[in-house]
Amino acid sequence: MIEITPVKQLEATEVLAWLTLKFADWLELPVEELESRRPISSYGLDSISAVTLTVQLEEELGIELETELLFKRPTLQSLAEHLTESLNAEGKQLP
């Protein structure tokens, strides 16, 4: 008999923690300076950088994302919620 192990469902809090570390690295800011409900654009992110970061997220997470994602989900909190839904829907985990 083949045993199927269910994929662990991600929580938005763990995706937010991962995302915060990623953005701190990409934006070259201390993690403590990033606030989950503050608009990402307030950290100096322009449209070209937003598209570049979206592509990097796609590559790291292995899911397809809309180019304008960071404009539709303008805070780390809302982005983490969206990514959690997308990752869980596709049965993916954080890298």
Image (cartoon, grey):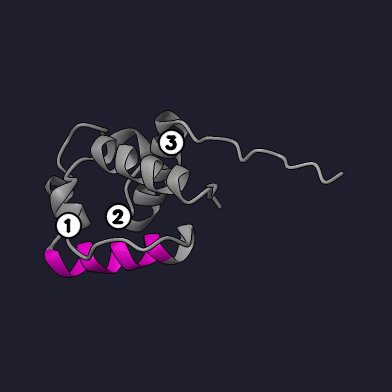
Comes first in the chain, label 2 or label 3: 3
The secondary structure type at the circle numbered 3 is helix
Amino acid type at circle 3 is Ala
Q: Which mark is residue 64?
A: none
Amino acid type at circle 2 is Leu
Q: Is residue 81 above or below residue 70?
A: above
| 2 and 1 marks in contact (CB < 8 Å) | yes
Give the foreground label among 1 and 3: 3
Q: CA distance from mark 2 to mark 3?
A: 15 Å
Is residue 31 shown to the viewer in this render? yes
Q: CA distance from mark 2 to mark 1?
A: 8 Å
User: Does 62 sit left or right of 31 as displayed?
Assistant: right
Q: Residue at x 30, y 43 (%)?
A: 82
User: Does 7 sit left or right of 3 as displayed?
Assistant: left
Reading the image, the residue beneath label 3 is 17
Q: Which stretch appears magenta? A: 47-58
Question: For this rendering, which residue is in front, 22 or 31?
Answer: 22
Q: Is residue 82 above or below residue 13?
A: below
Q: Which mark is residue 45?
A: 1
Main SS, magenta residues: helix
Q: Which mark is residue 27?
A: 2
Give percent across and percent down for residue 35. 25, 33
Q: CA distance from mark 1 to mark 3?
A: 19 Å
